[in-house]
Image: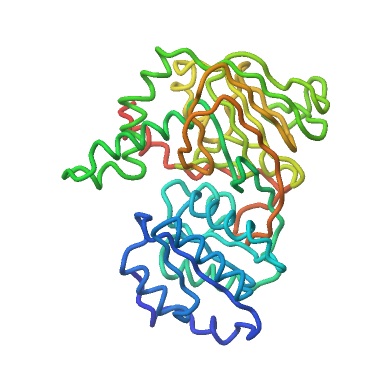
Amino acid sequence: MTDINTLPHELHASEPAALKVAVVLNGNARAVSDALIRDVRMAINQERLYVSRSLEQWKFIARRIVNKGYDVVLLGGGDGTFAQCVTDIMALKPAQVPTFGVLRLGTGNGMASALGVSKPNLRGLTTELRRARQSAARQSLPMLRVEGKLTPFTGIGWDSMILEDYNIVKRTFRGTPLENMMQGGPGYASAIAFRSIGKAIFQADPKLVIRNEGAAAPRVTIHGEPTGEVVPRGGILYSGPATIAACSTVPYYGLGLKLFPHALRRVDRFALRVAKVPVGRVLPRLPSLFAGELEDEGLHDYLCTAVSYHLDKPTPLQIGGDEVGRRTSVNVSMTHIPVIWGDAPRPGEAPVASILDLDAFRKALDL
């Protein structure tokens, strides 16, 4: 961990006295160690640091943040942490909505990648604290509403199946010498290699109907160009079997997977991607998939404001990278929240490149 004495000292001197910033850490996140918590306390006043290790603590912290009227809330612990804390705070209907920032301390870090958040060290934290106090860093970001939760992404199909398998792998190795090895990237790689790929090959995909419940939704090509007819409210966006049906307001899933290359093209829409692509057709083209450049006749991309899913059988659902069980119907709408934007291009700017170390990922999968 970086020594606090080596960090720039202008941070505190430049802080506006009236601006209140809270840092909330997920104490269960792998990267949130006692050493990190100690260093964060050195970097900021202790009363502005909150560490949660349970849902009850999340709700208590959310109420405290609203009651104290914090202007900015920096969240450290991954996409699930971000979704949970934002949901709990917004459920309290604060008179003044705080601006939300992200610290790169989770497993997936899709939000951190999308916003261009600094590296997960003390110098990076200092950068994000400084950025949190800059009005130019603030930007409106769409968020999905799914089952009462605010989240950057949600999906059924391969993504939720992999998450379900990953959680099974973690539970299987809990309490064993391999427990730590089955966390994060290696755990996902093991789940994919030994469980998910077999399911994708031998199990039938769920059949679903996706209906447009909002503004007219254009279909777009991989290059973002309109194609085909615009689907009006009430129209059918997709009908049939699907390997994945996911919505997102940011380009990335975990591990740098740029599954939604169109997510930041418009701030008034989220990206819907439906795919019916056999796993054997995807694996040879992993580089294109992770870079957001995969072209396939089985891909269907739309820009939407609200949709509903109707499935023929209970299917795993993930919300913000958290497994929430199986569903036969799902409704997705959108809202907006203010966020702290990092070094990544903002909505409407040039598309961002994939940040995945693809060689390492392929090696982990033994491909």
**Above-or-below relation of 82 to 285:** below
Quadrant occupied by the N terminus: bottom left
Residue 280 image offset from top left, x and y in percent: 44, 16
Residue visible at 32% across and 63% down? 33
Residue 81, image x and y in percent?
A: 49, 54
**Residue 133 higher or lower than 181, as above or below:** below
Q: How many marks?
A: 0
**Residue 30 picture quarter:** bottom left
Colour mode of the rendering: rainbow
Image quadrant holding the C terminus, namely top left
Residue projecting furthest to the left:
177
Q: Residue at x 35, y 37 (%)?
A: 167
Instruction: Tell me what residue is drawn at x 57 percent, y 43 percent.
Output: 353
Going by the image, does 337 lie left or right of 256?
A: right
> What x and y, as percent, mark residue 69?
64, 74
- Residue 51 rendering spot, x and y as whole percentages: 42, 66
> Which residue is drawn at the image coordinates 68% and 44% (left, top)?
264
Front-lying residue, 193 or 356: 193
With 354 as the anchor, is 146 left or right in this view?
right
Q: On the rendered structure, is 59 left or right of 229?
A: left
